[in-house]
Amino acid sequence: MHELSIAMGIVDAALEEAQQRGVHVTAVHLRLGALSGVVKDALLFSYEVACQDTPLQGSQLIVEEVPVVVFCPQCEEPRTLASVQSFTCPECGAPTGNILQGKELEVFALEVEERSDAQVKAPPDAAQSASRQEEVPR
Ligand SMILES: [Zn+2]
């Protein structure tokens, strides 16, 4: 499934960002163009799958759908297409393939919260005693 690999890419990028900033991601905001070739429902499902067993599990993917906007050579104005089936200006009917937007597939925001418990609860005992045993000469 095409959407699963896209969702995994989104999750990977969000995880990396979260790690660098030392935060926990609670939601990912994505712009999705009508011409991106991605089915929103399939992507939402794939995102949940991709988040399983990662720190992003339980986070939300929030999709902002972007309509197709073309530049009409006749009106000399950007026009929003009513349908991706016909690339003609909705005002004057002139054909146009000059796409200004609608191919977006981009994460533009992350909702995060501070990871307050990460350091406090880490029990150092096990790791330390293990390394001490290795240092004992025999
Ligand atoms: Zn026009």
Image (cartoon, rainbow, N blue to C red):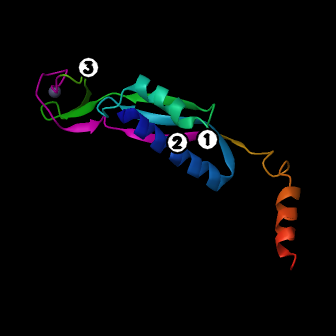
Q: Amino acid at mark 3?
A: Ala
The one of 106 and 37 positioned closer to us in this rendering: 37
Which marked residue is nearer to the observer: mark 2 or mark 1? 1
Q: Is residue 33 magenta?
A: no
Query: In terms of secondary structure, what is the magenta stretch mainly?
Result: loop
Q: Which residues are magenta?
A: 86-110
Q: Does 48 sit above or below residue 105?
A: above
Q: Amino acid at mark 2?
A: Val
Is 115 left or right of 71, judged from the image as shown? right
Of mark 2 and mark 3, the one earlier in the sequence is 2
Q: Amino acid at mark 1?
A: Thr
Label 3 environment density (alpha carbons within 10 Å; few <14, some 14–19, many ≥20):
some
Which residue: 52% across, 46% down? 12
Of mark 2 and mark 1, the one earlier in the sequence is 2
- When asked about the image quadrant of residue 111, the answer is top right
Q: Residue 107, percent across and down? A: 47, 41
- When asked about the image quadrant of residue 79, the answer is top left
Q: Which residue is mark 2?
A: 11
Label 2 environment density (alpha carbons within 10 Å; few <14, some 14–19, many ≥20):
many
Q: Does 113 sit above or below residue 126?
A: above
Q: Does 56 sit above or below residue 92?
A: below
Q: Which residue is mark 1?
A: 54
The one of 33 and 5 positioned closer to us in this rendering: 5
- SS type, badge 3: loop
Which residue: 62% across, 55% down? 20
Q: Residue 101, percent across and down? A: 30, 36
Q: Which residue is mark 3?
A: 82
> In the rendered structure, are the residues bearing label 2 and label 1 in contact, judged by CB atoms less than 8 Å apart?
yes
Which marked residue is nearer to the observer: mark 3 or mark 1? 1
- SS type, badge 1: loop
